[in-house]
Amino acid sequence: MKIGIIGVGNLGYSVAIGILSEKQHIKCKSLYLSKRNPRSLDNIGNLSVVKITTENKRLVKYSDVIIVAVQPAQLKGVLEEIKDVINPKKHTLISVVTGRKISDIEDVLGNDLPIIRCMPNTAISVGQSMTCISANERGKKNVEYAKTIFNALGKTMCIEENLMQAATVICASGIAFWMRLIRATSQGAVQLGFHSEEALELSMQTCLGAASLLIDSRSHPEEEIDKVTTPSGCTIQGLNEMEHQGLSSSLIKGLVTSFEKINEI
Ligand SMILES: NC(=O)C1=CN([C@@H]2O[C@H](COP(=O)(O)OP(=O)(O)OC[C@H]3O[C@@H](n4cnc5c(N)ncnc54)[C@H](O)[C@@H]3O)[C@@H](O)[C@H]2O)C=CC1
Ligand SMILES: O=C(O)[C@@H]1CCC=N1
């Protein structure tokens, strides 16, 4: 695959790093990167597989799979810029742009082009993204391209496009939500006597352990909670206090508020 990424900011850069670390598996022959100020890419610019440009048309010309990772307000301009050099027989366009529908892209580039909408998260740079995927009619045949890239960099789930906004909140914004939970538990650990680096390590590994338990055993979170909550013990006491203070409720309300905002983007 010859891959091009238009918009190498926070997410585009994470995707690029992920692709570079899995380039044998993804069979990435070349990785064209474009952004407005490419000097920040100097650290990867000398890799033989990487080409850096500010010309999106050039990127399109030399790529088969084009990943667009610009801000929502920048998408239309980018599509207008590349539309003359897009060839539906050669190219597949993958958009990771929040809140922009496949039909918005088809309005500019037409529905002959395979278009795949993906929502990864920044854990892609360490091969642990949860990426949701949907495609237009023409893109369904080429969805394997997206799966090859994103399965090498975490897990994928094909979903109906009308769930993409919800997936964005749970998986992409979700990284920030989980970070705050890890940060909060480490702050608690400091209050209980640990140094901050130790506290963060305890929180991170416990978080990883909890997720791994569910992934490996496929059990339900409540089943695992039951195993930890000794009758009259400290865990149930703490858990119930968290719930009295609205832990689950505030998380759900936050997710819904995030979802309401995303529908305005
Ligand atoms: N940051 C995240 O965790 C996630 C972001 N997204 C979505 O991905 C998109 C990118 O987000 P970020 O990386 O956070 O934004 P960002 O602002 O960090 O990156 C955007 C990049 O696009 C470049 N750019 C702007 N116009 C351009 C043009 N005409 N040609 C080439 N490059 C151009 C900018 O130079 C910048 O490097 C957004 O639509 C965002 O909603 C989706 C999932 C997760
Ligand atoms: O906060 C945002 O709007 C974008 C979408 C998901 C992650 N970042």
Image (cartoon, rainbow, N blue to C red):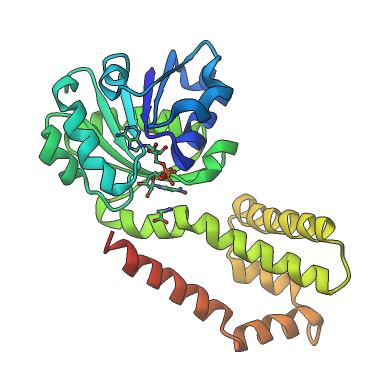
> What residue is at 50 percent from the left and 80 percent from the top?
249
Q: Check the image and report above or below for 259 versus 102.
A: below
Q: Quadrant of the C terminus?
A: bottom left
Please indicate whether residue 83 sits to the left or right of residue 261 in the image: left
Task: Classify residue 189 as left or right of residue 243.
Answer: right
Nearest to the observer: residue 223 or residue 155: 155
Q: Is residue 61 visible?
A: yes
Residue 204, x across and y down, in percent: 72, 55
Q: Quadrant of ligand 1?
A: top left
Q: Position of residue 192 (x, y in %)?
A: 85, 74
| Direction from residue 196 to residue 32 in the image, left or right | left
State whether residue 19 appears in this view: no
Q: Nearer the viewer, residue 243 or 87?
A: 87
Q: Residue at point 78% right, 84% down?
A: 231
Q: Is residue 19 left or right of residue 106?
A: right
Going 14% across and 23% down the picture, which residue do you hit? 84
Q: Is residue 121 above or below residue 227?
A: above
Q: Where is residue 203 shown, x and y percent of the image? A: 74, 60
* Above/below status of 79 relative to 133: above
Residue closest to the eye, 61 or 206 = 61
Q: Can you tell which quarter of the image residue 36 is in?
A: top left
Quadrant showing the N terminus: top left
